Amino acid sequence: MNKKSFVIGAALVAVVFSSSFSAKAEGGSVRKTPFMLSLVDPLALPSSAWADWDVTGIRLNTLYGNCRSLTGLDIGLYNSCSQLKGWQIGVINEATVMKGLQTGLINYANSAMGVQIGLVNVIADKDWAFLPIVNASF
């Protein structure tokens, strides 16, 4: 099996897996999925408005991805979410509330309990909000 066939097969399995196991949260319209693949918001699999999805697992973003809540791993060029519990890896990482790790060129969080590693690191609710290379809040 060549590399291209493997990647296509893995993507199809992930899409089927995420569609099969996504579920609505009790009492609300927020749905949960273990995997999300985003080209640019709102073009994503599973497809829907980003505010309707919580990702618990892995989200892969080719250009820009956005979701309400992410618990797990977020990989892409520009990653954005309201609630992050996990690890964002990208060129630009953004979270309203971050609990975990952000690694990229530019990392931004309104509030954080964790570490940012990158060229520009901002945790807005700190007294000293900007620090290059490493920034942390606990």
Image (cartoon, grey):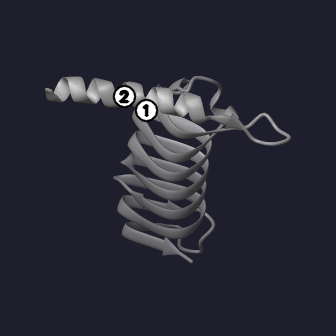
Q: Where residue 51 appears, x then y in whole percent?
A: 68, 34
Residue depicted at 55% across the width and 37% down the height: 66
Q: Residue at x 50, y 55 (%)?
A: 108
Q: Could you tell me if residue 9 is visible in this image? A: yes
Residue 129 appears left or right of 110: left
Q: Residues within 10 Å of mark 1 (few under 14, many from 20)?
A: some
- Name the residue at the bottom extreme: 138
Give the residue type at disc 1.
Answer: Ala
The correct choice, above or below, for 133 with respect to 19 in the image is below
Q: Secondary structure at mark 2?
A: helix
Q: Distance between the Cα atoms at labels 1 and 2?
A: 5 Å
Which type of secondary structure does the marked residue at label 1 adopt?
helix
Q: Position of residue 26 (x, y in %)?
A: 81, 42
Frontmost residue, 49 versus 23: 23
Q: Residue at x 68, y 36 (%)?
A: 23
Identify which residue is drawn at 53% across, 27% down: 41
What residue is pinned by disc 2?
Answer: 11
Residue position for label 1:
14
The type of residue carrying mark 2 is Ala
Give yes or no for contact between labels 1 and 2 (Cβ–Cβ under 8 Å).
Answer: yes
Tell which of 136 and 73 is nearer to you: 73
Q: Position of residue 24 (x, y in %)?
A: 73, 36
Quadrant in which the N terminus appears: top left
- Asked whether, in this view, residue 103 is left or right of residue 57, the answer is left
